[in-house]
Amino acid sequence: MLLFISKRIGQTVPVVLLVSFFVFFVINVIPGDPTLTVLGEFATPEQREIARQQYGFDRPMFVQYVDWLTRTLSGDLGRSLHSNERVWAMLVDRLPVSLELSALALTIALLIGLPCGILAALRRGTTVDTLIGMFSAIALGVPYFWLGVLLILLFAIVFNLLPPSGYVPFTESPVENLKLMILPALTVGLHVAPLIIRQTRASVLQVLSHDYVRTAHAKGLPWSAIVRKHILRNALIPVLTLVGLQLGNMLGGAIVTETIFSTPGLGSLIVAAVSTRDFPVVQSGIFLIVLLVIFVNLITDILYAYVDPRIRQLLIV
Amino acid sequence: MGTGAAEKTSAPGVGAEPRLVRDLFQHRQGAVGTVLALGLVLMAVLAPLLSPFDPQHVNVEKILEPPSATHWLGTDELGRDIASRIIFGGRVTLQVVAGAVALSLMAGAVLGFIAAYLGRFWDALIMRVIDALLAIPPLILALAIVAALGPNLFYTILAIALAKLGMFARLVRGEVLSLKSMEFVEAARAAGASNTRIAFKHIWPNAAGNVIVFSAVVASSALLIESALNFLGLGAQPPTPSWGVMISTGMQHWTLWWMSIFPGFAIFLAILAFNLLGDALRDIMDRRLLDVGRL
């Protein structure tokens, strides 16, 4: 297992380096003068030159990249061009909100996805299966930002059950926090649920066709025990991978969702930074999200290899 | 084994087979998806004929009107007809999606082809870059590119294409790797065919079927990214009619439900069309491969 983990980490390092390279170069392609954001339109050429030297914009791009990477890895992400706040502090402030949103969204997606997927597979070809299939086809087509708007219209405007937007930290008031987070979490969760339904249904159907299920049935084991002990344990392994892979999808969805519900997470910070062309924030925010995605994928792979030794062998060989 | 070439050449190619159209209409989801997608394309092409009003015509006397016999889907904050803006918005969306899918398909196919065909160093280099590209969630990558280049339709196409080309590169690489070891390719090589001829005459026609099927799947996620970027104000700029922008404008007038409901429904139908079409095409291709396997 240790050999697998070290090999998998070894594969991750070049990906992280390449991603950092992409993120830096994509953001620094920004045409125009970056000192415009810092000094505004009316600064003199001399003032611009000083700002260029101060922020290091006058150095070759590759030197700027190496400097940025070294500083980033040591935790120094620079300062916002807009507010002059430390970027690291801004990200650390927003990260827990996005993680809470993702965790709640994942819980909702699993609470809907797993039972529906299992039920659809066990009742294959029946009306239940068709209805669940229709639900997942429709839910997959609904754009999450529109779903967010629909949920606000329904629960906040028409029925006046929940507040439409805003945020209260969990530590301040858990009830208020959940009231404000439930709609954004539903928005992201309902977007991911159909993918979990489809994967669970396919995995359960595949396991159902295996000989050991037939054997368990033949030896008189009750159906509930077969489902619990033989089918679910094996069928849920691929679902675990999908859940890991969906984290990127959820964080991507959270960018838009946070903007709709005025949730102060990483996503809304990045969107606001894009509109003010505050590229140290955009660059570090995007890099942090990608690092999170890569980290979760790594953990998912390790967990997958832990529960299924065949995967471990594949990479080691 | 001896029939390998015939099997492969006859198996996945979508080409211009009329059978595909028949299969699509016999597949329940495929029929719905095809009708919806055709409707969308027709709406975009015939927009000037179908649209009841000029989508950019400002009418201060008709501001924020609910749906009525004159304005079926109501009017917006500038008195513009929402139905007409949805019809013309479809045109913009389809242009972006078609451009992004075509660009990512071409770039991805070239990279996948080079990686699989040249192998060794080039394969390792290209695929590591693709892995890194795929590690970035597509919407976030597109957002970074648009943030860098500025909001503009062409940059939106470029951003979505870059976010999606990795998937095409992986698919084409896989297809080419399996095809290049097949007997008909070895036979062509033995007969003295050049690498270019083998690539374009023998390998690509056989790989194209799955790539085209995959395009429908990519189109639906491209559409989602396009409308998300527009929603965030980073795609089409006013006064160009755009579904995503219409929803975000509607959010400033919560009680006026028609402003955000109808454009959102248009995005939903378009994504549903490509999802159903993609699923159906995949089903049909899988079934054909199974049929070939049984021969």
Image (cartoon, coloured by chain):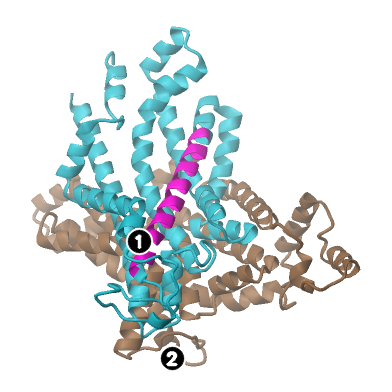
Chain colours: A brown, B cyan
Alpha-carbon distance for marks 1 and 2? Answer: 41 Å
Which secondary structure lies at badge 2? helix
Residue B157 on image: x %, y %: 51, 51
Q: Residue at x 52, y 59 (%)?
A: A293
Relative to B23, A260 lies left or right: right
Q: Chain of mark 2?
A: A
Pointer 2: residues within 10 angstroms few (<14), some, or many (20+)?
A: some
Q: Chain of mark 1?
A: B
Please say if A117 is above or below A210.
below
Instruction: Residue B60: name its quadrant.
Output: bottom left
Residue A240 lies in magenta, yes or no? no
Q: Is residue B126 at all visible to an observer of this figure? A: yes
Seen from the viewer's position, the closer of residues A32 and A69 is A32
Front of the two marks 1 and 2:
1
**Mark 1: amino acid:** Ile
Residue span colored magenta: B83-110
Pointer 1: residues within 10 angstroms few (<14), some, or many (20+)?
A: many
Residue B89 lies in magenta, yes or no? yes
Please say if B157 is above or below A116.
above
Q: Residue at x 51, y 89 (%)?
A: A171
Q: Residue at x 67, y 51 (%)?
A: A21
Instruction: Residue A120: name its quadrant.
Output: bottom left
Residue A253 on image: x %, y %: 45, 66
Seen from the viewer's position, the closer of residues B272 and A234 is B272
Contact (Cβ within 8 Å) of mark 1 with mark 2: no
Residue A57 on image: x %, y %: 81, 60
Q: Which mark is residue A176?
A: 2
Q: Which mark is residue B87?
A: 1
**Mark 2: amino acid:** Glu
Which secondary structure lies at badge 1? helix
Instruction: Residue B136: name its quadrant.
Output: bottom right
